[in-house]
Image (tube, rainbow, N blue to C red):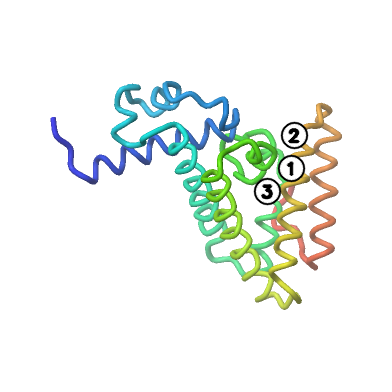
Amino acid sequence: MRYDASHKQQTRQRVLRAAARAIRSDGAQRVAVAGVMREAGLTHGGFYAHFESKDALVVAAIGQMFDDALAQWQRVNEGRGDAERLAGYIDLYLSAKHRDHPGHGCPMAALASELPRLDADARRAFAEGSRRLQQALSQTLARLGHDDAPALAASVLAELVGAIALARCEPDRKRSNALLASSRHALYRRLSLTSAEKHE
């Protein structure tokens, strides 16, 4: 049976989203093509109709992760003002849900420690995605009147990524929750924000 270009693109997206979840959960070097294809509901033999190698899949999946992260930023914050949008992003990022479900979380937190061991194309895809997230945050900070918004955006992202990474490393749940809470409140104070949500 022959399929049109639209079907092929939809199938590719299924593979990419399955690969993105696997990479965020287990790391790029542990991802197996057979497992990704199985998760996408496809046979291993169909892989090469979409990607020439596992490395090419990883590069494309990294780009997909950042596309999804930016789409989530827009979806979650639709209809909100800039201050509420920024507070909502911090609340969502530094939440127990994000900590406990890395397979659906931020690609920066999932991949930063592994990235030096990946190839140059993967590092470029990550750098481009990171710049896109930083730009979205910078634009929001600039509209809120913060000076040197690009540098501030880079610093805020570094704090977010570092805090969620440390919270995931902490085996004591109460300590982990406290770390997330203290990081949220430090960022609220620094950026003159009020929390958009309540946390347990």
In which quadrant of the rendered view does residue 47 lie? top left
The label shown at residue 93 is 3
Task: Write down the residue under mark 2.
Answer: 168
The label shown at residue 96 is none
Q: Are marks 1 and 3 in contact (CB under 8 Å)?
A: yes
Q: Secondary structure at mark 2?
A: helix
Residue 170: % across, % down: 81, 31
Task: Write down the residue under mark 1.
Answer: 164
Q: CA distance from mark 1 to mark 3?
A: 8 Å
Mark 1 or mark 3: name the one nearer the start of the chain. Answer: 3
Q: Are marks 1 and 2 in contact (CB under 8 Å)?
A: yes
Residue at image position (81%, 27%) is 171
Amino acid tagged 2: Arg
Q: Residues within 10 Å of mark 1 (few under 14, many from 20)?
A: many
Residue 49: % across, % down: 28, 33
Q: Note whether 140 is above or below 16 in the view shown.
A: below
In which quadrant of the rendered view does residue 179 lie? top right
